[in-house]
Image (spheres, rainbow, N blue to C red):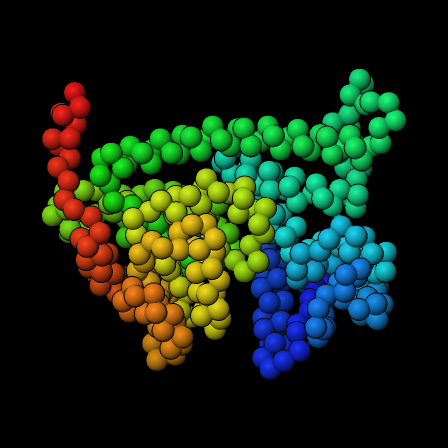
Amino acid sequence: ERAILFGLNRPGRGEKERGERSLEELAALAEACGAVVVNSILQTRMAPDSATFIGKGKLTEIRTVGEALGANLLICDDELTGSQLRNIETETGLHTIDQTNLILDIFARRATTREGRWQVELAQHQYRLPRLKSVAGELSRQGGGIGTRGPGETKLETDRRYIRRRIQKLKKNLKQLSGHRELLRHSRDEQGVCTIAVVGYTNAGKSTLVNRLCNSDLFVADQVFATLDATVRQLFLPGNQIRQRDTVLIDTIGFINKLPHELIEAFKSTLAEAAHADLLLLVVDGSDPDADEKLQTTCNLLDEIGAGNIPRVTAINKIDKINSIDISSMLYSLSIDNGDGSPIEVSAVTGHGLDNLRTRLDERLNDLVQPCYRTDYGRVHR
Ligand SMILES: Nc1nc2c(ncn2[C@@H]2O[C@H](COP(=O)(O)OP(=O)(O)OP(=O)(O)O)[C@@H](O)[C@H]2O)c(=O)[nH]1
Ligand SMILES: [Mg+2]
């Protein structure tokens, strides 16, 4: 597919650059779906147009550019309403999707576990339901067989009913699985296991760091959303003996700016692993020019999923790719403001700084948890 990207930036200093970077990120997402980006169009506006998102003139321009470049897909760098989607498609003659749709598509491609697939499907239905008119037709055969169609009922109503029913079913299935997760978490609690959730922007190197620290072989790739599950791995720290507790690292889903709320909602049991951790290991890609903005997004999302108050250790990763003087002072002030101590520079690839990181994790865990006498614990209950 040959895609044209479009977005808005507000007037003001630095806003245009911000808009351009946002379109670059959108391009990476589009490429992750196998699309070829042929052009990007940015318009300066105070606010989106309620009917067409960007101005009418721009839409005509997009139609012309699209025809010249042989484009067949238009992707908006924001979430669109159903009527905006329809109006833009009419004006440009191009199949149009928005950023949420794109991210849901990537998740759908990457989800491998049963839980992951159900979570993505739930998010997709919740996204589709209010926009059903523009995509009506896709589902007509699945929901409405003989006998399901009431008198005078339109296809749209049947579709809605099918989706609502499916949403209920998926929620029920997911609830069962999240019960299982809770059980596992509960048993870790009972055994006094210390949990550290590894969180951060997508592609920051979280899985690589978990692998390096735990000698594990989780999937790593230079792509957005390589990880869609919360995976638990045992971490051996010198302090485990002193605390008489085991420690685990939990690798989690990466965050992204404008992470669709449908996904946050659908993935809440997976994200809950971070929200219940004793400590967060926040991984930042220090070689990324937008590192401080991405850190801000990450912090906001942590608040949103209820993990905002968990103590954290910040690791600035990929230090092998940068000169440490280049690291924005913003990064330091952001994490110091949280009262969590200065960030630790590491490289998950070369292993640089990992001993410092282990020491810091140990110190923080010592502050947070008391020793527990695990071996006695089991006997008391028998
Ligand atoms: N140069 C360098 N590359 C790194 C380092 N850590 C990770 N990478 C690379 O960064 C890319 C992303 O790594 P992942 O570990 O998959 O990142 P992640 O944060 O788990 O990403 P998601 O699961 O997609 O959110 C891979 O190509 C890694 O090889 C590092 O310290 N230095
Ligand atoms: Mg990962």
Q: In the orientation shown, which residue stands out farthest toward the top?
A: 147
Along the line of sight, the residue nearer the viewer: 1 or 9: 9
Q: Give the image location of residue 369, x and y in percent.
A: 20, 48
Which residue is drawn at the image coordinates 71% and 30% (left, top)? 162
Image quarter for residue 280?
bottom left
Is 241 on the left-hand or right-hand side of 350?
Answer: left
- Tally of numbered tags: 0
With 74 as the anchor, is 284 left or right in this view? Answer: left
| Between 313 and 216, the one nearer to me in the picture | 313
Dividing the picture into quadrants, the one containing residue 343 is: bottom left
> x, y percentage for residue 197?
35, 50
- Seen as rendered, the residue at the extreme bottom is 13
- Of residues 216 and 189, the one nearer the viewer is 189
**At which x and y percent is residue 296?**
46, 65
Quadrant in which the N terminus is drawn: bottom right
Q: Is residue 350 visible?
A: no
Question: Which quarter of the rendered picture does the C terminus lie within?
Answer: top left
Q: Residue furthest right?
A: 152
* Residue 338 is at least partly visible in this image: yes
Q: What residue appears at the point 15 percent right and 35 percent down from the top-left corner?
A: 374
Give the residue drawn at x 79%, y 46%: 134
Percent position of residue 126, x then y:
64, 41
| Residue 125 falls left or right of residue 317 | right
Residue 138 lies in quadrant:
top right
Please name the residue shown 58% across and 79% down the image: 14
